[in-house]
Image (cartoon, rainbow, N blue to C red):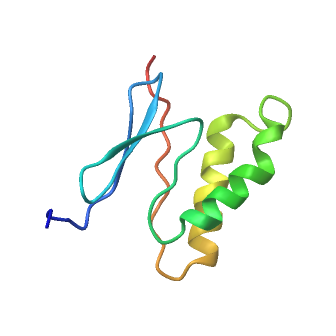
Amino acid sequence: GPLEYEFEAILTDGRGIWVVGGDFDVLAVRDFAAIGHGARFAYGAYHALRSMFGTLYKPEDVLTIAIAAACRYDPWCGGVPWVREAPG
């Protein structure tokens, strides 16, 4: 069968977002992407806060909070969040 690798990536060019899986399948994403063990917690935090864009939070704040939620509630998630605005 096809080879699978332990690899996931989120790519952007500032206009679109794509998730690349271990089989190198590329999927377009609408407005947010999370990968890895803590993804479900990141998606939950993002969904809860996204309506506050422009009022209480900037989009990069919501991303940082989503990453922090993933790291807080999933024991296999960790590291320092690195969020940068893509040129575009």
The percent coordinates of residue 44 (x first, y second) are 70, 60
Pick the front one: 29 or 88:
29
- The quarter of the image holding the C terminus is top left
Q: Is residue 87 left or right of residue 46?
A: left
The percent coordinates of residue 64 (x first, y second) are 61, 51
- Please name the residue shown 68% across and 46% down the image: 62
The percent coordinates of residue 38 (x first, y second) are 54, 69
Pick the front one: 86 or 31:
31
Q: Is residue 13 left or right of residue 47?
A: left
Residue at the limit of the structure toward the top, as seen here: 88
- Please name the residue shown 46% across and 79% down the image: 76
Residue at the limit of the structure toward the front, as seen here: 1
Tally of marks:
0
Residue at the limit of the structure toward the bottom, as seen here: 75
- Please name the residue shown 64% across and 57% down the image: 43
Q: Is residue 88 above or below residue 9?
A: above
Choose top left, top right, bottom left or bottom right for residue 8. Answer: bottom left
- The quarter of the image holding the N terminus is bottom left
Q: Is residue 43 above or below residue 75?
A: above
Q: Is residue 1 above or below residue 87?
A: below
Q: Is residue 28 above or below residue 81?
A: above
Pick the front one: 64 or 11:
11
- Please name the residue shown 83% across and 38% down the image: 52
Q: Is residue 12 left or right of residue 29?
A: left
